[in-house]
Image: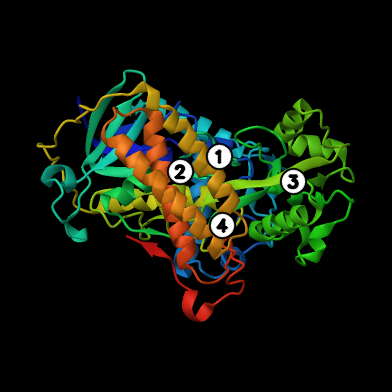
Amino acid sequence: MKIESDFLVIGSGIAGLSFALKVAELGTVAIVTKKEKAESNTNYAQGGIAAVISTRDAFEHHINDTMKAGAYLCHRDVVEIVVTEGPERINELIEVGVQFTKNNDGLDLGKEGGHSHHRIVHAADLTGKEIERALLAKISAHPNIRVYENHISIDLITEHHLFGNEKLSKDSIHCWGAYVLDVEQNVVKTFLATTTMLATGGAGQVYLHTTNPVIATGDGIAMAYRAGAEIANMEFIQFHPTTLYNSGSPSFLISEAVRGFGAILRNKKGEDFMKRYDPQGALAPRDIVARAIDTELKRSGDECVFLDLKHLNAESVRSHFPNIYERCLKHSIDITKDLIPVVPAAHYTCGGVIVDTNGTTSISGLYAVGEVSMTGLHGANRLASNSLLEAVVFSHRAMETIRHKERNTMVAKNIPDWDDSGTINSEEWVLVSHNRREIQQLMWDYVGIVRSNHRLERAQRRIKLILDEVKNFYKRTKVTEGLIELRNLSCLADLIIRSALERKESRGLHFTTDYPNLDDTNWLKDTSIT
């Protein structure tokens, strides 16, 4: 079954929906999303969007905060673009109908770790959910957009599918759409488009403990890599330092804004331990806070540390963080009276598919925005609340690029149908669940917050075995959602380990005991994989 449109958008977070709304004025749009259309990392984003709104703030402050948090690996030209274009994109979201929290001075601006000023535009502590609501309301009413829920992409369609295994030049690869599994109908559909946008989000599910929803299996990065796109900086996985201990999967995130509001991190002894690790204390960048907690836990043998809000006004805490307050109450924790037990969890993928300042990848006809992409904004560590900002800025820039350039309106007509002539051996389906769990445990134990060559090499040996197992199983088995995700997770694990082994220094989110220092002479550069 072939479905044609001018634009194919894979993913339904803020990046994909923003792009879809804008290009719908240029042609027809098909949005493919794995689960329900509102299920995305965006929907789980509590903190907000960082933007220079206050007259007491300035672009240069935001730029400097971003560069510092990213261990100066950020591409300064990209940082300047995102920061200076951010306020206009915020205004567009307001025009779309996003109801940001206000106070007597206008937009209520929060402050989070690594920020020198109050600049976090938010909707209480459910900013992502509010943005999704507003964008989806516009999407559902647009005649040029159709959303395909419960559809999981398998592979991007390129010249490889036209010419087989012939060796192709990187410059000759074009994306014509994607093969997509309709999970409910159990049939693979061929989505064809002259322009394809990857907006599939991150890959937190490659780790055992993560704040990401179960759909975050790195599908876009894996598909782009298999198609021949350039990938970079996969070693920089951000671990959110404060997720609610024993809150299930995905781990419930206690927003950075809670510390920005005045919460103190304490160990089991009650010590404000962050003062020993950084002058900013609990408001240090996430990589520093996560490593500090990891060190405290390994030193003490404890299973968690604690956030303390008891010294703050109870009514203010409840009004600023209603969702966190209610969720913690379900775990018998009153955050105005009790300490909140927290542990780090995998949260954000700073690397991804390399794009230019307009979201263009190295494959013709293929764009990437949001967490799936590597724009150069985040460098070695994402500054809190810069991700939603990046998504709206690059979605807009991608649309502008497409609008002003001559588009190829010809869709390849000889794309073959999907071949599902494999056979299912039901006795082997245990491989999917077992290998997924093994990947997650392996990555958590050996490729986590603190790394070493010994741990990375051990993880790489096992991942190579899993890759071979999955590849062989995939070749002779009809695709399912679980198998597609396992294939992508094994690919992502391999990319992360390879990148981590290549970087011979500690920078930002990548900390290795074999190379504990920065090396600006040799490693102030991206880690690229093709």
Q: Is residue 328 above or below residue 295?
A: above
Q: Earlier in the sequence, mark 1 or mark 2?
A: 2
The residue under label 4 is which amino acid type? Arg
Apparent side of residue 278 relative to residue 140 in the rendered image (left or right): right
Which residue is found at the position 78% from the left and 61% from the top? 281
The residue under label 2 is which amino acid type? Gly
- The nearer-to-camera label among 3 and 1 is 1
Q: Earlier in the sequence, mark 4 or mark 3?
A: 3
Dot 4 falls on a residue whose secondary structure is loop
Q: Residues within 10 Å of mark 2 (few under 14, many from 20)?
A: many
Dot 1 falls on a residue whose secondary structure is loop
Residue 382 marker: 4
Residue 445 marker: none
**Real-space Cα distance between discs 4 and 3?**
18 Å
Residue highlighted by disc 2: 201
Where does the image place residue 199, in percent across and percent down from the top left?
40, 43
Q: Residues within 10 Å of mark 4 (few under 14, many from 20)?
A: many
**Real-space Cα distance between discs 1 and 2?**
10 Å
